[in-house]
Amino acid sequence: MYIIAGLGNPGRKYEGTKHNIGFITVDALADRHGIQINKIKHKALVGEGFISGQKVLLVKPQTYMNLSGQSIREVMAYYKEDPENLLVIYDDVDLSMGRLRFRKGGSAGTHNGMRSIIYDLQQDNFPRLRIGIGGEVKGELASYVLGGFHGSDKELMEEAVKKAADGVECFLSEGIDKAMNQYNTSEKKKKKKEKEEGDQETDE
C-alpha cells in the first residue's frame, strides 16, 4: 500500500491558504478517484481507496503543520510500510509559484512540517512532491504562507494542483523516476514551453 500524505493546518481558518496546498492536492486526488477522507486515525483524517491500480491511504495530519511528524510516524508504524511507499506533498516558498518538484529524499529545507516528519521518522529517504508557492513576499513570511491565492495566482495554482494530481498518479503507476522526469520542469524549460504554446496560438 502507498501512503500519500498532504501537509497543512486543520480548520476553516486555514482553508485555501498557500501553506495548505498539500491538503488541497490530496483533496483533489480524493475527488478524482471517489475516495472519502473522513476517518480520524493516527492524529489524521484518512481515506482508503485505489489510484492507478494501487491501494492508497490518503492522509491529512491534524496536528498542525509543525507537528506533522507525530501523525506520519504513527501511520508508518501501524502499516509497517517501506519509506519508498510514502509520498509527502507540501508547499515550497523557494520554488516559483506553480512549479512542481518530485524528489526521492533529502533534507527538509526551510519547511517546518517536513522537518517534523524527518525528525520523527529518523530518516529522510522517502519521496516527496514540492509545490511552489514562491512569489513577492511583503512583510513576514508567516503571513505570506498563511494567506490565500488571488488573481492570476489562483488560476495558476488550480492548474498546478491538477498537474500535481497527475504526477501522483504517474508516481503510483510508473515510479518516482518517471514522475521526476515528466513533472520536474526547470524554469527555463517552463518558459520555453509557454513561448511555444504562445506561438502556436498566434499561428492559429
Image: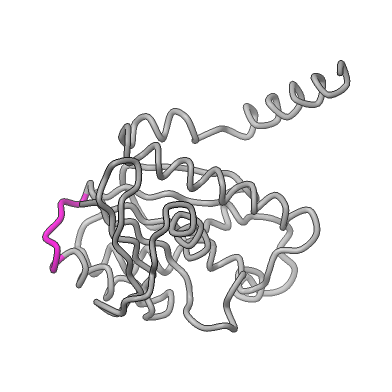
- Residue 153 lies within the magenta run: no
User: What residue is at 57 percent from the left and 78 percent from the top?
Assistant: 14
Q: Is residue 4 above or below residue 184?
A: below
Residue placed most toward the observer, 166 or 193? 166
Q: Position of residue 121 (x, y in %)?
A: 21, 64
Furthest residue in direction front, as rendered: 34
User: What residue is at 66 percent from the left and 70 percent from the top?
Assistant: 144
Quarter occupied by residue 19: bottom right
* Image quadrant containing the C terminus: top right
In the picture provided, is 61 more to the left or to the right than 80? right
User: What residue is at 45 percent from the left and 41 percent from the top?
Assistant: 167
User: What residue is at 48 percent from the left and 52 percent from the top?
Assistant: 32
Total labels: the figure holds: 0
Q: Is residue 56 above or below residue 20?
A: above
In the picture provided, is 9 more to the left or to the right than 82? right
Residue placed most toward the observer, 50 or 74? 50
Q: Which color scheme did the rendering employ for the protein? A: one colour
Quarter occupied by residue 30: bottom left
Q: Position of residue 171 (x, y in %)?
A: 36, 39
Q: Magenta segment, which residues?
A: 77-83
Q: Position of residue 12 (x, y in %)?
A: 57, 83
In the picture provided, is 174 more to the left or to the right than 179? left
Q: Position of residue 1 (x, y in %)?
A: 20, 52
Quarter occupied by residue 134: bottom right
